[in-house]
Structure formats: structure tokens, C-alpha cells
Image: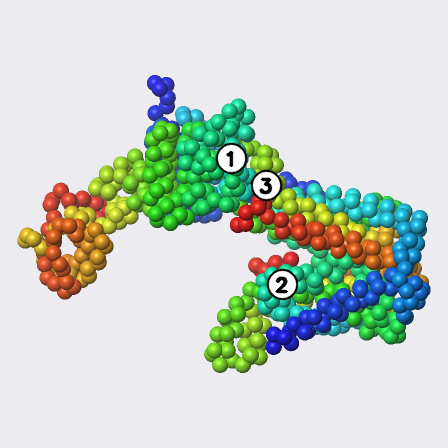
Amino acid sequence: MIFRRVPWILLPPVGWLLAFLVIPVGVVSARALTSEGVAALTSVLTWKLVGMSVVVAMITTILCLVAGYPVAWCIATLPRRWRHFVLFLVVLPFWANLLVRTYALMTILRPFGLLDTWFAAVFGLWHSYLPFMVLPLYTSIEKVPVKLLEAAQDLGATPSQAFWRVAVPLTAPGIAAGCILVFIPVLGAFATPELLGGAQAIMAGSQINLYFMSARNPAAGAAMTLILMVITVVLMAAFYRSRRNERLL
Amino acid sequence: MTDAPRYQIEIRNVTRRIGDRIVLDDLRLFIRPGEFFSLLGPSGCGKTTLLRCIAGFDRPDAGSVWLDGEDVTTVPPHRRDVNMVFQSYALFPHLSVFENVAFGLRLANATDVSRRVAEALDWVRLSSCGSRKTTTLSGGEQQRVALARAVVNRPKALLLDEPLGALDLVLRHGLQEELRRLQRELRMTFVYVTHDQDEALSMSDRVAVMNSGAIEQIGTPSEIYHHPNSEFVARFVGTANKIHIDGRTFVVRPECIRLGDRPGHSVTVTDVVFLGSRTLVIVDHQGARLVVETANSSGTGFFAVGQKTTISWDAAAMHPIPGNST
Amino acid sequence: MRSALRIWTAFILLLLYAPLLVMAAFSFNESKYATSFTGFTLDWYRRVVADSELVGILWNTLTIALGSMVLATVLGTMAALGLRRRFRGRRLFSGLVATPVMVPDIVLGISLLVFFRALSVPISLGTALVAHTTFNMAYVAIVVSARLEGMDPLLELAAYDLGASPWQAFWKVTFPLIAPAVFSGALLAFTLSFDDFVITYFTTGPGDSTLPMKIFSMVRHSISPKINALSTLILVVSVFLIAASRRMARLPVSEGSR
């Protein structure tokens, strides 16, 4: 209460973030706004790839939501001592090495001839980011009292009406958080589509890599990075604005 | 003793604003050494803020705080020789009972830590609990540890912020007695914040009744109860019947009103509340609601709702409310 | 209804784990081809351990992981402590601290790559360490913040009141209470750094490869039981570290439960 100014203890971490996050992001933005960058920003190819990435991210997000909601609901209704264990099981693969997981999928998909397809890329992304959907969903479903659903049914709602009119609105914050947590990283995904999608499924991330590592056109790469960054910031801002008191993490 | 300052704690014209709200308004208060002093008032009256200003957690926007004849207004809390007992105990969960009590002594590099901790635990009757974890104690025991932790440092004053607020009634009464005993034995100045009038009246040498950042009245419990100087004090401390006579306003306490046995004002009984040792009879007197308290041993008899009777009181029982008698 | 939900959950868990289990199983397969299981062998693990190039790469990975763990733990804990206070612009600062968790890895990786190139700093283990510290700091701050939120703010006031200076109050009261979260955050940072591919890929030089980068380049060319063995080893280490980190975060402050 006595502290009105920025506490001194924040100076080292904030200084670090200024030096290695804010300024680099500024440098990339400046790079993207040079003439070559602007050329890339206005090119059809750039927006085709961004559009493709957005579509893939949306499909992945929807698949994660459809698969994850029943899982989160199931965990929330499990006996207390099982709950944390099953939740841990769902979240654990996320903490395991991304490359290892992707490689594991490769070994499974290759014998079926599914490697280097859009299906493989989306399946891999779904596999990688499902925990991001389940975690916030579980947190918000756990807060919905079972009594409310019983009350809705007592008032004449069918189970499906109770679900759509009571459960879904009450868990909306979890749905929003889960969708954002899946959509943003998938949009910028690089390793998974690169290894599983191959030449068929090229997303923004692969193209950025190409611009920087082989095509030697960093301005165009910076331009695409800027687009991803702007989409991220807009989504985050919209999320925080819509629910001031909810925390994403 | 001759050089000792007259006052242990002096609050000199302290003002404290939080946002645009004035929490303490040019407040003056002088507390004597060895006194059990209570700050009584409804929640939001500024009593806790005042206590925090004495402890050093809050700094006044204007005015000064003096401790033992020294201006401590800008002294940080850890260099002020006062200790606080928090309502929520604030015991360190990672330390044992013994280490909680020893905390201040160790910081001060005291030499006889174990003897003094044992002594303090003895005062609060927890001698056998030193090695226990604080989280295994009951609420009442935790509050005693908090008390021992504060008094063991022999501060110039002990500040208690509604220390019994979280305890149930039976435990409260027990601890009230113990606090009083401890205060007498140690001859320490206690500043006790409470919103419970019974607690303030039964324990204190003097009471300050606070209302919206200012002190309404300071006095002994008896003065406060019998000679309230405002309607606020009269209503906050005990039940007050307001009576208008010749354009002046008086307060009469319920137990000073006699029912029925002699001529007086005629009234109608509207409710009867049985309370065990006494009965409250609520009567209507020309549209005004008056509360009359009768002891159940006095054989005043039985009153029924709707019954017509009379009330009367001695002139000495009438306390004029000065000033704002509207 | 309930059993349908449970069957669905079991099915999803199967989808999540089956590839990992299959991968681990084939690391013990005698045959070079992952089509059928011909016999049990530890030969592939022997080859991993004997690979001197891999040892150097492991060393690189550990250097970055340990270095960024230490830096990120200190910086992240400071951020969490500072963000408890109320001050002008607090929302902005807490948003800034959490940003590295939210932005796609590629954005952070590319930004730092462009930044280092602009400064003519050659990318190396050092630049990767800086990059890892930047995102790890955010995770540590989040873990420690959660613990601090559950801590009674009066405990620090009580310490001041009993004569502790702010420095003493921190080391005698605040730190012992948040220590489990600090250690948990440190382990988490180590694991994330150990596992990171995308950001490392853009911020370290070709001679300073890490294990995930090595796997990336290996799997582009072929699938071999040796990669299965290496991947299985990494998986086991990560799972162990994460389980330890979570156990630590939930460590109560004392044996008694509140």
C-alpha cells in the first residue's frame, strides 16, 4: 500500500525483458516495414500462407475443443483422488519433448503412408496442444456446481438443454482460454508441420524458417513474423478486455 | 518513574486519506502507560487504520505519532518498540510454536532466548506446546501463541487488532479474562481494537468510541455507558431509549425504566423477549419504540402483548444528549 | 452417460500415449525396421551412449539448461515478488512478464535472431542461453506468483512488527514459504530448456547443437531405432523432472495441513 512507484525488485526482470523481448520485437517490426518487408506484407503468397495457418489453427482448435470438453468434464466428475492423477496423465505429454513426441507420431504414421500429409500435420498439432485445451476447461468445469445442472433439470430442462443453457455459458471463460491457448501456438507452429506435413503442408512457421535459413530474405521473414505477432496481440487483448478478472494462466 | 513521559502513546492531529476517503480526520489521542485502552467503533470507523499508524504499517498524511515521548511518525515498523496481535494470528506456518515466539528475540540477538520463550509460553498457559507446529493448534491456542510472540519482546505497548474476533463465544470469554490478567501482571500498555461493546466495557481502563475517522468520546467504561455525550455513543454502547422532553433529548437505559408499579407515562406493550436472566419488554410510547429491561428475579410479573401499562424512571437516569439534539 | 465419458477419456489417453509407447517399444527391437518386433536388445542404447558426438551435444544442452535455469529462477522470482505490490502500471508489467509464455515460439526465436544479427552478435550457446532465460523467466514468475497469492500478506507485516528488517523478513519468512515454488519453477525451467527446439534452433549456431536439434536433423533423414532409444531416454528424463517439479510445488509448508 505504501508502494506507489515501480518496486526496485522489478528492475532486473523488466530490464531483461526490455532488452531481450521488447527491443528485439521492435527490431523485427522495423525490419518488416522496410521496402522489402512491405513488399512481402502485400504479396499474395504471404497472405495465402497466413490464411492457411489460420485455417489449420482453427481446425485444430475446434478438434481440441470437441475432444477435450468431454475429457475435462469426465475428469471433473471423477472421485477426488483420481482427479489429479488423470489430469496429470493428460498434461504430462505436453511437458515431454516436442521433438520426441513428433518423432513418435512419425513412427506411427509412416507405416500407414500418412506421413507428409495435411492430416498428419493437423493430427500432430492436435496431439501436441490438446493439454492446453483440457487444463483451462477442467478449471472452469470444476467450478460449476452439480446442483445448478440438477436445478436446471428440476425446472424442466432436458440434459442437453441443461448442458447448452447452463454448463456452456458457465464454462465460457474456460472455453475462451483453452481456444486461445491452442490457437496462438498452432498459428506459429514450425517443427510439427515441418516434420509431419512435409512439403504438402507448409504453414507460416515453415515459410519464415525458409526465408531466414535458406532463401536469405529476412525482411520477408520479419514481415510474416510481424503478422503472427499482431494476431497474437489482438487475440490476447480481446481476451483480457472481455474478462478483466480472469487469468489466462 | 519521575522522568517517564506522561503518555505512552500520543496521536497528534493525525489525518490519513486512502484514495479520496478521509479515514482518520485530525485525530488526537493520548494513552497512558500501563493502561488497557480500547478503540471501539463500527467497522470502517478508522480504528484499525489508527492501530496500523501506531504499529508503523500505515503512515499518516498529516500529524505525528509519539511513542514514549519520541516522535516515531517516520520510523519503520521494525524499529518501533510496539508489537501487534493480529485477528488472523499471522503465525509463521514454517516455524514451531517455540520458534514463532522466539522470532523477535532472535532478531534482537537476545541471550536468554529459551528461558524467555518458556516464560512467555507459561504466561499464556502453553508450556507444553513449544515443539508443536502452529498448524496443529486450535484457534484459541493459536491466538495465545500470537500473544506470547508479541509480549515476549516486552514492547512498550501491545497492539491488539480484534484478537478474539475469529473465536467462538465461550473461548472469547475465557481469553478476555486471560488478557486482562496478563495485562495486569505485565503492567503493559494494551491498545485493543474491537467492535464489540461488551468486550470494550468489560476489559478496558478507558475506551475511545470512534465514528467516521474521529473520536466521539473518551472515558472509563462507566462514563461512556452512563454519560454518553452523543446519540451515536449512546446507541453504539448499549441500548438507548431516546426521549424528548421540553425540546431537549435524553437517553434512558432500558434497565433504568420501571414498568407498571407506579404512575407514569402510559404505554402499550408491543413485544416481550425472554432472555433467561432478564426479559425485554418493548413498549410503544406515543409512537416511539422504547425498550425496557426487567430482571426475571424481581417478580415484575408477566406482560402480554397489547397490554396497557405505565413506565417511569428516576431523574438521575436521564442523560441529556448535548449538541445535536434534534 | 458417465461411462461414455470415461470410455472417451480412455480413448483420448490411448491416442496420446500409444505413439510414445510404440516408439519406446521399438527402441528395444533387434531389427532396424519398425515394421515388426523381431527380438529384444539393448544394442541401440549402447550405440547412443557410445556416440561421442552425442555426448558433446548433451553437454551443450545441459549448459544452456542449467545456466538459463539459474538466471530465470532469480529473475522470475524477483518479478513475482515485485508484481505483488500495487503500483501504477502493474497490469502492463504483469502482461509483459507473461508475454513470452503466450507468443508463438517462432516469434520469440526470430525476434532474437534478428536482434542478435542487428547487433552483429554471433549466435552461439550464449545467445541461446539468453533466449531460454527470457521464456523460462515467465514460467518461474507464474509458478512463484501462484504460491505468493496463497501466502498470507500479514506474515511479512508480523515479521516487520517483531523487529525484522525487510531483508530479514524476506529470508526468515517469505523465502522459506515460497521455497517449494522457487525450486519447482527452477526444475520446470530446466526441463523446458532441456526440451526446447524452436527457439534454440533460431538462436544457436550450427556448431552448438542441442539434443532436440540433433533429433530434428536425424529424423529428417531417416527413422532408426537409435533415435527411438535416444528419444526414450530424453522422455524418461523429462517425465521424471516434471513429476519432481509438480511434487515440489504442492509441498505443504509444514506437515500439518491448513
Can you say whether B111 is above or below C118 in the image?
above
Please give the residue where the numbered disc 2 appears in the rendered image: A82
Camera-side mark, 2 or 3: 2
Q: Tell me the residue that label 1 is attached to.
A: B98
Using the rendered image of the protein, determine whether residue A138 is visible from the camera's viewpoint.
Answer: yes
Q: Residues within 10 Å of mark 2 (few under 14, many from 20)?
A: few
Q: Residue at x 66, y 45 (%)?
A: C182
Instruction: Decide: few, some or many residues near mark 3? Use Cα within 10 Å; few <14, some 14-19, many ≥20.
Output: many
Q: Residue at x 74, y 60 (%)?
A: A94
Q: Identity of the amino acid at label 2?
A: Trp
Give the residue at x 79% y 49%. Answer: C131
* SS category of the residue bearing label 3: helix
With A39 as the anchor, is B176 left or right in this view?
left
| A105, above or below B143, in the image | below
Q: Position of residue A101 (x, y in %)?
A: 80, 62
Residue bearing the label numbered 3? C174
Determine which of the numbered discs, if any, sits on residue C187 in the image.
none
In front of the other: B66 or B220: B220
Report if the CB atoms under discs 1 and 2 are less than 8 Å apart.
no
Q: Is residue B58 left or right of residue A197?
A: left
Q: Amino acid at mark 3?
A: Thr
Q: Quadrant of the C terminus of chain A?
A: bottom right
Decide: is A16 above or below A181: above
Q: Residue at x 52, y 67 (%)?
A: A145
In the rendered view, tell whether residue A247 sits above or below residue A119. Answer: above
x, y (%) of residue A82?
62, 63
